[in-house]
Each structure stands twice: as structure tokens, then as C-alpha cells.
Amino acid sequence: MTTDNSLPNAPTRLVEATIRLLATSGPSEVKARSVANEAGLSTMGVYTHFGGVPELLQAVADEGFKRLATVFKRVPITDDPITDLCAMLLACRDLARNNPHLYDLMFGLSIDGRYSPSRGTMTTIADGQSEAFKATYAILVKACARLVEAKCVRKIEPEFIAPQLWSAAHGFIMLELAGHFAGMENPASQILVATCNNIVVGLGAKREKVESSTAGVIAEWTSPTEA
């Protein structure tokens, strides 16, 4: 094991090591020593490059949003904005299911409340300071703008549509990760897509059109390759 914390890729190695630990062992294992061991660096590297574990967790959350942005961008753009939005929300759900602890961390939360070291320091949602979050969210806003431009809904500012869909998707994902839909055959279709359909219809779209557009996505959905 090397302990050369001056390596140019040391910060990236620490972030990637944290993501692996989250996926395999959960948040309780995210400590300076365990992360450094996983990255093949000395514990001091966490403090040298990030200042401490809370700041490292912020960097990991930002990496999560960068990965979500990549997944969003891999969703094919079609001539149907409703179809594209549905695919983006399903892609977000897939990313969360692939690494639920990372998704938790991206929003400064944890189902088990184990991210207490970072509480009060996460900037992803609360004050909008994370550039990674803003860049990712901008992709969703742009997709909502296409919804308005194509006259699928009433003339509404995309900035008001995006948080409605984002809230519906995030609420569904958090509940699903906590096991609340375990008894349902297809919660993504029955809850997530159905809820977002209702939002878009409420914004002025015709229900028949919305359900036709999203039905095709559900039937053919294949997750874009994750970053």
C-alpha cells in the first residue's frame, strides 16, 4: 500500500474509495482511516485534501450529482418531451437503487440517520451552493423547458415545473429505498410514473397523450449505462 498523499489523483482515489465503502458497507464505515485504507493512502490524506470527513462527504455527494448528470445526458432526446422526462426520472431511480447510500448522501440525509458528521455542512439542496448539483438540476430544468416549448403544458416557467417533478421523484425514491413499496409489483410504474403523469396533466397536458408517452418508456425501459 502506498501512502503518498501527494499523488495527483489522491483526491479522486479518496472519493472513489468512499463510494465503494458506501456501496459495500454503508455509512457507518466511512471514517478517515477506513477510507484511506481503501484508497491505499495514509489517513492524513483525508485531512490534507479535504480538511476532514464532512468535507470529503461533500465531495462524494458532488460526485454523485456528476454521475446523475451523466446518466441524464445518456437518456436519448426524442421529439416527445414527455417521454424524455419520464426516462430521466427512471434513470434517477436506477442510480439510487444501484447505490442507495450514495443517493442518501447526495441529499444530506440518511434513512438510518448515520450521516451526522456532515449535518449542517452539506450544501447540495439547502442553499444551492453546490455547482455539481446546480449543473445536474439544470438538465432537468432544460427538459421541462422543452415541455413548455412543445406546448405539451400551459405556458409555465420551467423553474416551477422542475421542482414539482424533482420532489415527486425524490419522495418516491426515498420511500422505495426504505422498503415501503416492497409489496407492489411495479412501483416505478404504479407510483413514480403515475404521480409524475398526474403532475403533467395538472399542468395542462392531455391525459391520453401523457399516458401514451410514458407507457412506451415503461415498456421498453433499459437503464443507461451508469458512470
Image (cartoon, helix red, strand yellow):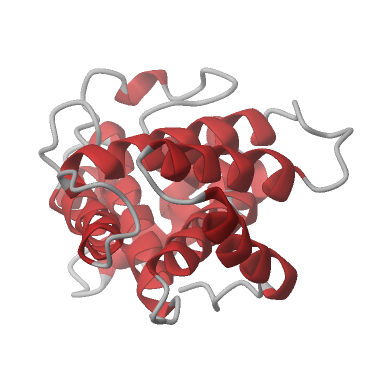
Q: Is residue 179 above or below residue 19?
A: above
Question: At x 48% / y 46%, what residue is drawn?
Answer: 102
**Quadrant including the C terminus:** bottom left
Question: At x 40% / y 42%, what residue is drawn?
Answer: 165
Name the image quarter holding residue 95: bottom right
Closest to the observer, 61 or 116: 61
Question: At x 61% / y 56%, what residue is drawn?
Answer: 211
Left or right of residue 226, residue 58 in this image: left
Q: Position of residue 96 (x, y in %)?
A: 56, 49
Closest to the observer, 86 or 133: 86
Q: Position of residue 36 (x, y in %)?
A: 41, 52
Closest to the observer, 125 or 99: 125
Question: At x 28% / y 56%, what residue is drawn?
Answer: 144
Left or right of residue 90, residue 156 in this image: left
Looking at the image, can residue 4 be seen?
no
Left or right of residue 41, residue 122 in this image: left
Looking at the image, can residue 116 be seen?
yes
Q: Position of residue 109 (x, y in %)?
A: 43, 26
Name the image quarter holding residue 108: top left
Q: Position of residue 62 (x, y in %)?
A: 27, 51
